[in-house]
């Protein structure tokens, strides 16, 4: 009986140690995700689809991605993705690219239920884009679902709201992507109406 108790105790301790070991060593083996791989692919898709409609000297504004569940918020992931897309546009030879961060979302809304595929920029977004003489705007949203983040981006003609090109990418979830989604920022709490920058 004593031997049986010792054996049972040994098995229990071994099981606990094995579970702890698996827990400790799970992180190094998680999938590595390079965010710029996905943001550059999204930018490349927008550029290639609109190549006959947008010139390299067309002024383009890039808006921070919005959380699709709360369009007045973004996150480090949304800001980083937009920044990287802006960098890619400049790398590809576009000469007049800037960023805008609005107090309200730059997300598009369908102009009417009957007009499928026709979208309008929000009033603030259009006013700011037109003030910069922007010909096109990059806008988009992200949504968390299961083990991935779906990022949808559009290149929009500012004057008409016409969608010139579109891209959807799915980013696999890991601990780093989770951290980038943690700190949602409310545009309405930002005292600035917009900011602009362009990679050197």
Image: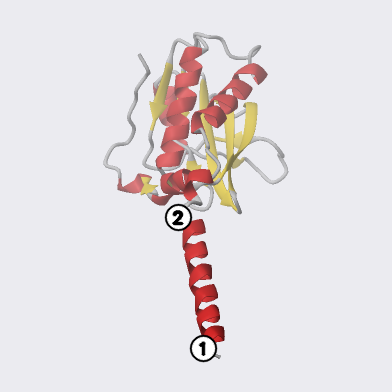
26 vs 94, nearest the viewer: 26
Q: In the image, is residue 168 above or below residue 8?
A: above
Q: How is the image coloured?
A: secondary structure
Q: Does residue 103 show up?
A: yes
20 vs 123, nearest the viewer: 20
Looking at the picture, how far across and down is residue 98, in whole percent?
40, 21
Q: In the image, is residue 64 above or below residue 4?
A: above
Looking at the picture, how far across and down is residue 147, in whole percent?
59, 50
Query: What is the residue that sits farthest to the bottom in this orientation?
Result: 1
Q: Which residue is mark 2?
A: 24
Q: CA distance from mark 1 to mark 2?
A: 33 Å
Which residue occupies 37% across, 18% down? 199
SS of the residue at dot 1?
Answer: helix
SS of the residue at dot 2?
Answer: helix
199 vs 33, nearest the viewer: 33
The N terminus - image quarter:
bottom right
Looking at the picture, how far across and down is residue 68, in whole percent?
53, 48
112 vs 15, nearest the viewer: 15
Q: Residue 2, labelled with which disc?
A: 1
**10 Å crowding of disc 2: few (<14), some (14-19), many (20+):** few
| 159 on left or right of 195 | right
Give the quadrant of residue 198. Answer: top left
Labels 1 and 2: the sequence-earlier one: 1
Q: In the image, is residue 72 above or below residue 106?
A: below
Which residue occupies 54% across, 79% down? 7
Which residue occupies 32% across, 29% down? 195
């Amino acid at each position: 009986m004593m031997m049986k108790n010792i054996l049972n105790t040994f098995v229990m301790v071994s099981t606990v140690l094995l579970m702890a070991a698996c827990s400790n060593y799970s992180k190094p083996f998680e999938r590595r995700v390079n965010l710029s791989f996905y943001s550059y692919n999204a930018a490349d898709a927008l550029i290639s689809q609109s190549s006959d409609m947008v010139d390299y000297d067309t002024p383009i504004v890039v808006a921070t991605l919005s959380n699709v569940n709360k369009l007045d918020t973004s996150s480090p992931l949304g800001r980083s993705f937009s920044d990287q897309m802006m960098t890619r546009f400049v790398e590809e030879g576009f000469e007049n690219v800037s960023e805008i961060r609005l107090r309200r979302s730059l997300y598009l809304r369908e102009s009417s239920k009957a007009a499928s595929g026709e979208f309008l920029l929000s009033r603030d977004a259009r006013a700011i884009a037109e003030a910069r003489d922007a010909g096109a705007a990059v806008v988009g949203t992200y949504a968390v679902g299961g083990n991935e983040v779906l990022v949808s981006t559009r290149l929009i003609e500012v004057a008409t709201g016409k969608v010139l090109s579109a891209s959807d990418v799915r980013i696999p979830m890991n601990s780093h992507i989770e951290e980038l989604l943690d700190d949602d920022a409310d545009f309405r709490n930002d005292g600035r109406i917009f900011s602009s920058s362009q990679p050197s």
